[in-house]
Image (tube, grey):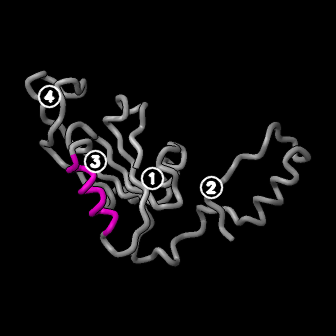
């Protein structure tokens, strides 16, 4: 679990990395994370990602959201939730103790987890071949480190 400092000092976004042992686990974790004191108070964005995604790495989180989340199916909104008087998005100030939360399931769909799309992963052999020729191909610096490789 990670609270991103860039999101209002860590209060506004929480990312939970989890292994999905059964159907419905990711939505349950999202709901629970929205109810504990740290999540209930001000968090606006609560995101669940699979265990292969580092919750502290915003690039990996965005990758998971872009490749594993279907917005129409995987985002729930909680309305009239506990918030803070300091929330600048709530105007008039009288409305500030109330807010909302987006629960974003950026996990692989559990029913297809074993055969989930490989298109978002690079084969390890291809990555290693390109990385070995990185400089020869005219690229500066070191090749990027990929965290999601397909064997």
Tag in front: 1 or 2: 2
Residue at 24 percent of width and 50 percent of height: 34
| Residue 116 in the figure: left or right of residue 32 | right
Left or right: 131 in relation to 83: right
For the point 38% across and 55% down, the residue is: 48
Report the residue marked by disc 2. Answer: 147
Which residue carries the number 3 mark? Answer: 102
The residue singled out by tag 1 in the image is 65
Instruction: State the extent of the magenta-drawn residues as a range.
Output: 25-36
Q: CA distance from mark 3 to mark 2?
A: 26 Å
Q: Would you call the spot at circle 2 few (<14 residues within 10 Å), some (14-19), or many (20 or more)?
A: few
- First along the sequence among labels 3 and 2: 3
Q: Secondary structure at mark 3?
A: strand
Q: What secondary structure is found at the residue carrying circle 2?
A: loop
Q: Residue at x 14, y 28 (%)?
A: 96
Dot 1 falls on a residue whose secondary structure is helix
Q: CA distance from mark 4 to mark 1?
A: 28 Å
Task: Measure the C-alpha gap from mark 1 to mark 3.
Answer: 13 Å
Residue 142, given in percent of the width and then of the height, sits at 79, 42
Mark 4 or mark 2, earlier in chain: 4
Residues under labels 1 and 2: Cα distance? 15 Å
Residue at (43% x, 66% y) in the render: 19
Q: Quote the CA–CA distance across marks 4 and 2.
A: 40 Å
For residue 96, the mark is 4
Q: Which mark is residue 29?
A: none
Cβ atoms under marks 4 and 2 closer than 8 Å = no
Give the structural element (helix, strand or loop) at label 4: loop
Residue 85 location, x and y as percent? 16, 25
């Amino acid at each position: 679990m990670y609270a991103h400092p860039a999101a209002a000092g860590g209060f506004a976004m929480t990312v939970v990395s989890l292994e999905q042992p059964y159907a419905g686990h990711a939505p349950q974790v999202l709901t629970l994370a929205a109810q504990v004191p740290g999540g209930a108070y001000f968090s606006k964005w609560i995101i669940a990602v699979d265990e292969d995604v580092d919750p502290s790495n915003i690039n990996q989180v965005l990758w998971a959201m872009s490749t594993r989340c279907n917005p129409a199916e995987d985002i729930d909104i909680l309305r009239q939730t506990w918030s803070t008087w300091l929330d600048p998005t709530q105007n008039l100030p009288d409305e500030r103790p109330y807010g909302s939360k987006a629960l974003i399931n950026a996990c692989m769909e559990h029913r297809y987890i074993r055969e989930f799309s490989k298109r978002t992963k690079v084969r390890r052999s291809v990555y290693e071949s390109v990385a070995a020729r990185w400089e020869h191909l005219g690229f500066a610096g070191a090749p990027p480190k990929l965290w999601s490789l397909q064997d």
